[in-house]
Image (cartoon, rainbow, N blue to C red):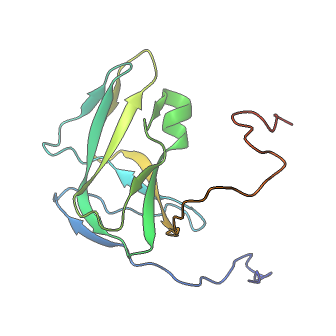
Amino acid sequence: MTTDVTTNTVPARHTPLLQIKRLHPDARLPRYHSEAAAGLDLCACPHDGAPITIGPGQIEKIPIGFAMSLPVGYEAQVRPRSGLASKHAITLPNSPGTIDADYRGEVIVPLINLSAVPFTIEAGMRIAQMIVAPVAHAVVRESEELTDTSRGSGGFGSTGLH
């Protein structure tokens, strides 16, 4: 694939359709906040509109107010927003979270407060980002032997830091 040198862009091969079904009238549709953003921002949509406070060390499931349909062959990866994580220690306990193409329930983002002070999520606050990515399905085959590599069975940290 070649890059257009005048715009520094690569032509898209296929743009997946992300269908959104609003479940709450105040739900904000996911959107990219800059032209080159990788992630769609997800906004909190508490069902009663009231703020949700996450205590230190607690996990709260934050509703987003919509359900969606991804095409088969894609997933949505839900990731922390860097500002919330670095400034307030608010992140996802399962990062990245995966939303499968066959899920049709409300999108809900679990957040954890790793700080020592409570943090309040307001309706409409951008709390996470979602990356739509292709997924490959592997063929699983049991084998008696595996191919050799120079790393072998070296696990965590076996390749060093530098």
Q: Is residue 106 left or right of residue 130?
A: left
Q: Residue at x 43, y 47 (%)?
A: 128
On-image quarter of the N terminus: bottom right
Is residue 122 visible from the viewing direction of this image? no
Q: Residue at x 32, y 63 (%)?
A: 29
Q: x and y percent of residue 64 in the render?
A: 27, 51
In this picture, is 11 found above or below 42?
below
On-image quarter of the C terminus: top right
Judge by depth and name the residue closer to the eye, 58 or 120. Answer: 58
Q: Residue at x 43, y 61 (%)?
A: 76
| Farthest-out residue, front | 144
Number of on-image labels? 0
Q: x and y percent of residue 73 in the render?
A: 44, 74
In this picture, is 49 found above or below 6?
above
In this picture, is 5 found above or below 112?
below
Q: Quadrant of residue 112?
A: top left
Q: Is residue 133 left or right of residue 42?
A: right
Q: Quadrant of residue 113?
A: top left
